[in-house]
């Protein structure tokens, strides 16, 4: 378990806060302790800790996304893979909250639950096309945030209207169109990405 490994690497520092007469507990001990914790209580404490260390940065981008961790299933026990919808604070580089769902299709119901966990005032929330819903956009605005929602074929009429607007603007060489854009560059997961 990586917690025990971290503890061994930081033992001198940890001894400033704890008496460790027998050294760092083993990974089995950490496992037993975590198995005894009530998940709801741990989640509440973790969320409070994240809020305490998070620096609120005006205009911070909070990316909402769903992921299925590899090998999170247990076929022997008949358990499907775990699917999480998470909120990632890009400037703080920390997960602000997450909600487990049964399957990827449940992201639409999980996104509002994740948003409920967050302080969005002054932040920009980004969500992929699955989150392009009126109620989700309204919730973000009601919580004081702004949003960038991806638009694909799941919003057929709206996608077609936006496409026509861009075709018309392009045909007029964008005359009378005041462009506004935000460009961010990110490094992670072995990729270098620029979003505009």
Image (cartoon, rainbow, N blue to C red):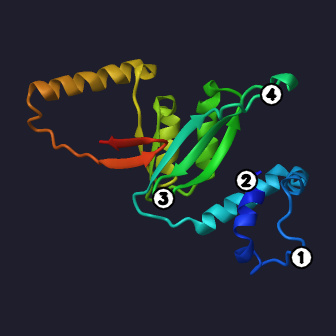
Kind of element beneath mark 4? loop
Q: Answer left or right for 73 relative to 33.
A: left
Mark earlier in primary sequence (1, 4)? 1
Query: Where does residue 101 sit, x and y in percent of width and height?
Result: 69, 33
Q: Are marks 1 and 3 in contact (CB under 8 Å)?
A: no
Disc 3 is placed on an element classified as loop
Q: Residues within 10 Å of mark 4 (few under 14, many from 20)?
A: few
Query: On the rendered image, what quadrant is the C terminus found in?
Result: top left
Identify the mark at residue 2; answer none if there is no mark.
2
Residue 39 placement (x, y as % from top left) = 82, 50
* 49 lies above or below 170: below
| Crowd tier of the residue under label 1, counting other residues whose Cα lies within 10 Å: few below 14, some 14–19, many 20 or above | few
Which is more foreground, mark 1 or mark 4? 1
C-alpha span from label 3 to label 4? 40 Å
Query: Where does label 3 land, which residue?
Result: 121
Please determine whether, in this image, residue 42 is positioned above or below residue 112. below
Q: State the residue in front, 149 or 143.
A: 149
Instruction: Point out the tag, 4 or 2, that comes first from the N-terminus.
Output: 2
Residue at image mark 4? 74
Circle on res. 21: 1
| Residue nearest the viewer, comparing 112 with 36 | 36
- In the picture, measured across the screen, residue 78 lies left or right of residue 60, that is right
**Cα separation between marks 2 and 1:** 21 Å
Image point (41%, 63%), residue name: 58
Q: Position of residue 90 (x, y in %)?
A: 47, 53
Q: Going 16% across and 43% down the picture, which residue do you hit? A: 178
């Amino acid at each position: 378990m990586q917690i025990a490994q971290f503890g061994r690497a930081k033992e001198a520092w940890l001894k400033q806060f704890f008496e460790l007469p027998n050294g760092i507990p083993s990974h089995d001990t950490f496992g037993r302790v975590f198995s005894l914790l009530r998940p709801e209580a741990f989640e509440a404490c973790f969320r409070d800790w994240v809020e305490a260390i998070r620096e609120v940065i005006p205009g911070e981008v909070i990316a909402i996304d769903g992921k299925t961790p590899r090998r999170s299933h247990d076929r022997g026990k008949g358990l499907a893979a775990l699917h999480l919808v998470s909120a990632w604070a890009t400037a703080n580089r920390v997960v602000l909250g997450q909600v487990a769902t049964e399957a990827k299709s449940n992201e639409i119901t999980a996104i509002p639950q994740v948003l409920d966990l967050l302080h969005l005032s002054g932040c920009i929330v980004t969500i992929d096309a699955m989150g392009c819903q009126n109620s989700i956009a309204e919730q973000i605005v009601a919580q004081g945030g702004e949003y960038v929602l991806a638009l694909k074929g799941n919003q057929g009429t709206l996608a077609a209207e936006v496409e026509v607007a861009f075709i018309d603007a392009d045909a007029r060489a964008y005359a009378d169109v005041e462009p506004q854009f935000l460009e961010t560059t990110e490094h992670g997961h072995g990729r270098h990405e620029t979003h505009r």
